[in-house]
């Protein structure tokens, strides 16, 4: 799953949300001044990744794109965030615009308390409203283009994320149904692992 899903699948606590989204750039390492909620969010990120990587529906979605491909996982992660934006009201009690706006504002207040690498990452995510950028297919395409600009020459010689767009279009409805089957299971996993009650998250 990508940024939007990781922030959503968090307790309604900015430290928890930041820990969840920072687990990858910080490689799961707890920094000296991290709170317990930061660390709980990082652990939840790992649980989400483990659950997702082992799920047969995710494997099916990847196989719908092409038989082989180094970037299939990245492409599906971002595509699932797009489908999450599209079906947001099915799963979430708070509207997407308000949810993203609140996260962006709260995260900006926390920048000075984060390590420089984490602070720069969160500033980039929030200043560019990345969580709100998947609301239409054009935004998804732009996100793939941003990824491609960061790929190494070695990977670019093999493939790009944008090269998958025709595959996505050809299999759009099937992968969408994959997402709709999978995401409720991921929500249940989050609620169980986090031991959270309805007052601690925005999930239906």
Image (cartoon, rainbow, N blue to C red):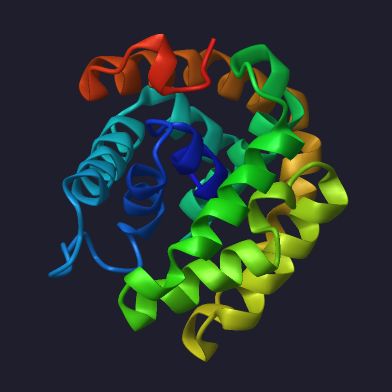
The structure residue drawn at horizontal position 42% and vertical position 46%, both measured from the top left corner, is 14
Tell me residue 133's x, y (percent): 74, 52
Quadrant where the C terminus sits is top right
Apparent side of residue 186 relative to residue 109 in the rendered image (left or right): left
Question: In the rendering, at what x and y percent does residue 64 appear?
Answer: 60, 35
Closest to the observer, 97 or 158: 97
Q: Residue furthest left?
A: 32
Q: Is residue 138 above or below residue 6?
A: below
Which residue occupies 71% across, 18% down?
89
* Residue 166, position as x, y percentages in the image: 79, 50
Q: Residue at x 42, y 15 (%)?
A: 199
Of residues 1 and 201, the one nearer the viewer is 201
Q: Is residue 90 left or right of residue 72?
A: right
Quadrant location of residue 31?
bottom left
Q: Is residue 89 above or below residue 11?
A: above
The picture places residue 168, in percent across and down from the top left corner, at: 73, 42
Which residue is situated farthest in the bottom direction here? 153
At 71% from the left and 36% from the top, the residue drawn is 98
Camera sees residue 192:
yes
């Amino acid at each position: 799953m990508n940024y939007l899903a990781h922030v959503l699948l968090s307790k309604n606590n900015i430290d928890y949300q930041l820990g969840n989204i920072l687990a990858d750039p910080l490689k799961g390492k707890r920094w000296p001044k991290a709170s317990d909620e930061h660390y709980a969010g990082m652990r939840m990120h790992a649980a989400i990744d483990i659950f997702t990587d082992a799920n047969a529906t995710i494997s099916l979605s990847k196989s719908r794109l092409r038989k082989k491909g180094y970037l299939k996982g990245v492409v599906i992660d971002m595509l699932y965030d797009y489908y999450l934006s599209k079906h947001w009201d099915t799963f979430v009690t708070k509207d997407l615009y308000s949810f993203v706006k609140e996260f962006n504002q709260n995260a900006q207040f926390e920048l000075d308390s984060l390590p420089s690498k984490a602070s720069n990452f969160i500033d980039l995510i929030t200043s560019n409203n990345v969580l709100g950028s998947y609301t239409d297919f054009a935004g998804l395409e732009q996100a793939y283009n941003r990824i491609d600009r960061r790929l190494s020459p070695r990977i670019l010689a093999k493939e790009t994320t944008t090269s998958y767009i025709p595959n996505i279009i050809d299999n759009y409805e099937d992968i969408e149904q994959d997402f709709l089957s999978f995401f409720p299971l991921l929500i249940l996993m989050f609620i169980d692992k986090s031991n959270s009650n309805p007052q601690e998250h925005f999930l239906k």
